[in-house]
Amino acid sequence: MSGRTRAPACPERTCVGCRERAAKKDLLRIVAIKDECVPDHRGTLPGRGAYVHPALVCLDLAVRRRAFPRALRAPGPLDTKALRLYVEQATP
């Protein structure tokens, strides 16, 4: 064994919009509550989560590809109005 120590790995997730891998802390977690996509900026809401860059470009790609219902395993379409409002306010 070598005497080298490894730095702790930073968890990575894939953005459902652009499909690029990024550090978990750089992405916004999305959960489905009833039939609505809700931003989970603290990462504490229960349930399955999907990750997206907090940018309108990635959000639009995810909506166009219908990625949220598939990633969250929702039976039907999900409302993304609250999510869009959150991303618009968070984007400088």
Image (cartoon, rainbow, N blue to C red):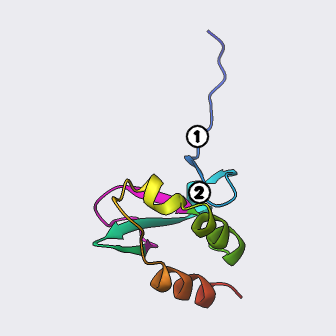
Q: Residue at x 56, y 56 (%)?
A: 24
Residue for point 70% across, 58% down: 18
Ranked by sequence position, the earlier of labels 2 and 1 is: 1
Q: Nearer the viewer, residue 25 or 76?
A: 76
Element class at badge 1: loop
Which residue position is annotated with label 1?
9
Asked whether, in this view, residue 83 is left or right of residue 38, the answer is right
Can you give x and y, in whole percent of width and height, for residue 87 in the image?
A: 59, 82
Q: Position of residue 83 (x, y in %)?
A: 50, 80
Which stretch appears magenta? 39-51
Q: Residues within 10 Å of mark 2 (few under 14, many from 20)?
A: many
Q: Which residue is mark 2?
A: 16
Tag 1: residue type? Ala
The x and y percentages for residue 66 are: 54, 62
Residue 41 versus residue 86: which sits nearer the camera?
Answer: 86
Residue 84 within the segment the image draws in magenta = no
Residue 5 drawn at (x, y percent) = 62, 28
